[in-house]
């Protein structure tokens, strides 16, 4: 009985500790990554999607408040800032290959970014979504740390924007290969750049796991989309909400 009582006391202590949240997050992603590799990198077995489901299920099971979870997960959240700054590296490395392709890439970036906003916002309005949801959809296709910064700047929910950004990345990473195959797009730099625009970090990770050139162009697209989006999305938001 004493041993059982001790185990219960330890569990009560751990369940309220922020470090448990950090452990849950890292363990869930590691498990998702193992399953992804075991599936021979099947797009449907996305490690981020698996981690999200596992973390959400576990904290619901142990009834951990989100505020407690975030106290531990904020260490990972803090690293998002460093990851955003590190986007300068793939942009710099990709500059040499941009000279001959600069025009088509910038045009596709602008059209792709605009399409991602107008389609999401248009569908949300069509279904009568609340203005809070519609506003959070504007920055959802740029990488999550930048998207959250844009959300704060335009006065919408950063948390809701982060949710939409993660969902966009997961769906993009899962669906993009099939869609690009259907369109007959075979060049790796084209496939990578497209995925980087539409599915930011999660899509870029998927592109790197398949082909290095695709990953390089995906990271380039993600970085450029983040920079241009941070400037132009607030302007577009205010123009559409006058």
Image (spheres, rainbow, N blue to C red):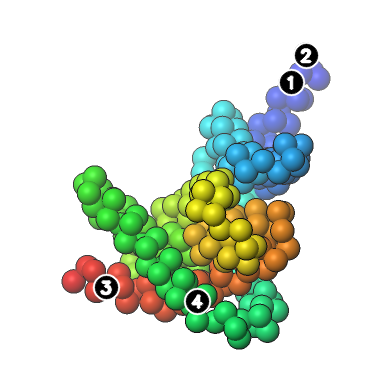
Cα distance, mark 2 to mark 3?
Answer: 64 Å
Mark 2 or mark 4, which has the lower sequence index? 2
The extreme front residue here reads 184
Which residue position holds label 3?
A: 238
Residue 237 horizontal side relative to residue 83, left or right? left
What residue do we see at 62% from left, 43% from top? Answer: 43
**Which quarter shows the C terminus?**
bottom left
Mark 4 or mark 3, which has the lower sequence index? 4
CB-based contact (under 8 Å), mark 2 and mark 1: yes
Cα distance, mark 1 to mark 4?
Answer: 66 Å
- For mark 2, give the secondary structure: loop
Which residue position holds label 2?
A: 1
Looking at the picture, does residue 104 appear above or below residue 25?
A: below
Which residue position holds label 1?
A: 5
Mark 3 or mark 1, which has the lower sequence index? 1
Cα distance, mark 4 to mark 3?
Answer: 28 Å
- For mark 1, give the secondary structure: helix
User: Disc 2 vs disc 3: which is toward the camera?
Assistant: 3
Cα distance, mark 3 to mark 1?
Answer: 59 Å
Position in image of residue 231 (x %, y %): 42, 79
Q: Which mark is residue 104?
A: 4
**Which quarter shows the N terminus?**
top right
What residue do we see at 24% from left, 74% from top? Answer: 239
- Evaluate whether residue 162 shows in this view: no
Cα distance, mark 2 to mark 4?
Answer: 71 Å
């Amino acid at each position: 009985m004493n041993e059982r009582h001790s185990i219960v006391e330890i569990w009560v202590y751990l369940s309220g500790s922020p470090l448990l949240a950090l452990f849950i997050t890292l363990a869930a992603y590691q498990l998702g990554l193992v399953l992804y590799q075991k599936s021979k990198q099947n797009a449907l077995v996305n490690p981020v999607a698996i981690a999200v489901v596992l973390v959400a299920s576990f904290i619901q099971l142990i009834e951990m408040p989100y505020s407690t979870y975030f106290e531990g997960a904020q260490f990972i959240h803090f690293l998002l800032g460093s990851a955003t700054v590190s986007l300068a590296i793939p942009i710099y490395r990709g500059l040499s290959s941009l000279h001959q392709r600069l025009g088509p890439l910038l045009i596709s970036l602008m059209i792709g970014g605009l399409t991602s906003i107008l389609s999401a916002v248009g569908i949300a309005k069509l279904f009568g979504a609340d203005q809070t949801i519609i506003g959070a959809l504007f920055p959802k296709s740029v990488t999550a740390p930048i998207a959250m910064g844009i959300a704060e700047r335009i006065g919408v929910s950063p948390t809701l924007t982060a949710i939409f950004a993660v969902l966009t990345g997961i769906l993009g990473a899962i669906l993009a290969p099939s869609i690009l195959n259907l369109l007959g797009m075979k060049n790796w730099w084209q496939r990578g750049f497209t995925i980087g625009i539409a599915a930011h970090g999660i899509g870029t990770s998927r592109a790197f796991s398949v082909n290095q050139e695709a990953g390089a162009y995906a990271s380039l697209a993600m970085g450029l989309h983040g920079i241009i989006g941070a400037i132009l999305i607030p302007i577009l938001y205010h123009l559409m909400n006058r």
